[in-house]
Image (spheres, grey):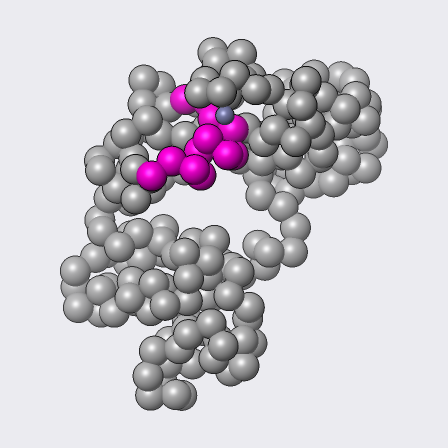
Amino acid sequence: MLSSVKEYAARVNYKYFSSTEYDKWKAKKGHSSTIIARFGCWKKVLLLLGIEGGRERRYTPEQLVENLETVWRQLGFPPGKRQIGKYGLKISESPYKQIWGSVRSACQAVARQKEGKISREALLEGSLSNNVRRPIPLKVRWEILKRDNYRCVRCGRNPSSDHKVQLEVDHVKPVAKGGQNDIDNLHTLCWECNHGKMDSL
Ligand SMILES: [Zn+2]
């Protein structure tokens, strides 16, 4: 069932697609509603495949950095949450939050890159060091979920018995500490177990 969604995702180059678009695909196995019933909602199904949806992803990291620099120059000091929403492209903090954690730390990352302390690649990945977080390939993500039986390895919950559960593929040894995308370094966690943990930074 999910492998069919995965196949469709590959066809559309892993861009976000709605359940309606998916249902129009003749070769699909199972209607989207069956899949949604198992995983809670469509957004979650796509998140499992590493596809983030919708409106929040309108800006590329390059555009966000460019906008930040423009506002910074205009103000003469590093912008915060309030200024970024008021000047330049008037972007909210949320896309910055997704990549850098906050507008403030985005400024910090930009400064570090200007000082030559981190690469541009690291900056655009939202990293303050050169340990770049490379996206976990879909194929690997898939293997991990399957290996872990679509359950959180910490608390054992799974989305088919509890629709509130959102599974994520997580690094056992954090990327910031040099963890890689090896199968041995990846496991399935629910959102709560993943974000409640203290060693993620
Ligand atoms: Zn859990």
* Residue drawn at x 25%, y 69% as measured from the top left: 111
* Residue drawn at x 75%, y 27% as measured from the top left: 36
x, y percent for residue 130: 22, 49
Q: Nearer the viewer, residue 82 or 192?
A: 192
Magenta stretch holds residue 86? no
Q: Nearer the viewer, residue 201 or 79?
A: 201
Q: Is residue 140 visible?
A: yes
* Image quadrant in which the C terminus is located: top left
x, y percent for residue 184: 32, 17
* Image quadrant in which the N terminus is located: top right
Question: Magenta region: which residues?
Answer: 187-198
- 169 vs 159, left or right, is left
Q: Nearer the viewer, residue 69 or 186?
A: 186
x, y percent for residue 136: 41, 32
Q: Is residue 168 visible?
A: no
Magenta stretch holds residue 189? yes
Relative to 86, say whether 9 is above or below: above
* Residue drawn at x 58%, y 31% as measured from the top left: 166
* Residue drawn at x 28%, y 29% as measured from the top left: 173
x, y percent for residue 13: 58, 37
How many marks the image carries: the answer is 0
- 86 vs 4, left or right, is left
- 117 vs 139, left or right, is left
